[in-house]
Image (tube, helix red, strand yellow):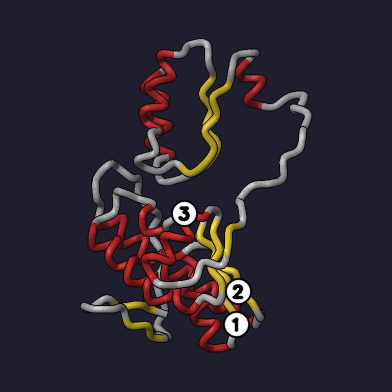
Amino acid sequence: IKITFAGGMPHISWLGDEYGDDEAFRESLMTVNLDDEADSYRFFRRVNRVFVAEGLRWRPQVCHCNDLDSLLAGVVLKRRLGTRIVFDAHELWTEMSQAKSKQWKDHFVRYEATLLPYADAVISVNDSIGEELESRYQVKFTGRILNAPFFREVAPPAQSAIRERAAGRPVVLFQGRYEAFRGLEELVESARLLPGVLLAFRGYGSLERYLVRKVKQAG
């Protein structure tokens, strides 16, 4: 599958050509990097080709597409097999990274506008995202499903690597993707002002090596 953006709305076509190995995502620096964007296009296409191949093998009745980066595969399966699509928006996908160029964003906004009307149901983790998708693309927001477990009391673990390293100090934990414009660099810098606190990161992302260097520089 490939989507081309040669002016106007993107055109969807089935292509049998093979794509080469994807380059590793390069480290994000606070500027637009066209090489990074080319990597994301290649990764996007390749992942959806894998999803389509597995879907044609499994022949599902319903395809749950979690965010825009999996929706293309769902649309192909719907056209090929009649599979129904549930689109699950955990965020406004085209707004996630301010480090992308306007061209990148415009392409994927048109991409989303083309594919989202194929969804049989549109759900989200909150009402505001669903209502924004309704407003942008004239699709019906089916409902909200909170991305959180039911609350229950749990006993703290007897020990953990973080607690052992904290040695009784308070712990400030960031858990999530290491990406630009999340304040992670500032968080590292602020740790110098809180000598009695352990700052811990748990996750992964394009800024990982950069953050490791920042921590080493901060001592």
Q: Are there few (<14), some (14-19), or many (20+) residues within 10 Å of tag 1? A: some
Is the residue under label 2 in contact with that under label 1 (CB below 8 Å)?
yes
Q: Is residue 205 above or below residue 66?
A: above
Q: Closer to the camera, 6 or 57?
A: 6
For residue 142, which quarter of the picture?
Answer: bottom right
Q: Which of the labelled discs sits on residue 63, or is there none?
A: 2
In which quadrant will I find the C terminus?
A: top left
Q: Are there few (<14), some (14-19), or many (20+) residues within 10 Å of tag 3? A: few
Q: Seen from this angle, which residue lies furthest left?
A: 7
Residue in the image at 58% along x and 87% along y:
82
Q: Closer to the camera, 121 or 127?
A: 127
- Spatial CA span between label 1 and label 3: 28 Å
Q: Closer to the camera, 144 or 155?
A: 144
Q: Going by the image, does 17 lie left or right of 62? A: left
For residue 184, which quarter of the picture?
Answer: top left
User: Which amino acid lies under the numbered mark 2 shown in the image of this protein?
Assistant: Cys
Earlier-in-chain disc, 1 versus 3? 1
User: Which amino acid lies under the numbered mark 1 shown in the image of this protein?
Assistant: Thr
Residue 124 is situated, as x and y percent measured from the top left of the image, at 54, 59
Q: Which residue is mark 3?
A: 128
Secondary structure of the residue carrying tag 2 is: strand
User: Which amino acid lies under the numbered mark 3 shown in the image of this protein?
Assistant: Ser
Q: Going by the image, does 164 lie left or right of 127? A: right
In which quadrant will I find the N terminus?
A: bottom left
Q: Which of the labelled discs sits on residue 83, or is there none?
A: 1
Residue in the image at 35% along x and 40% along y:
181
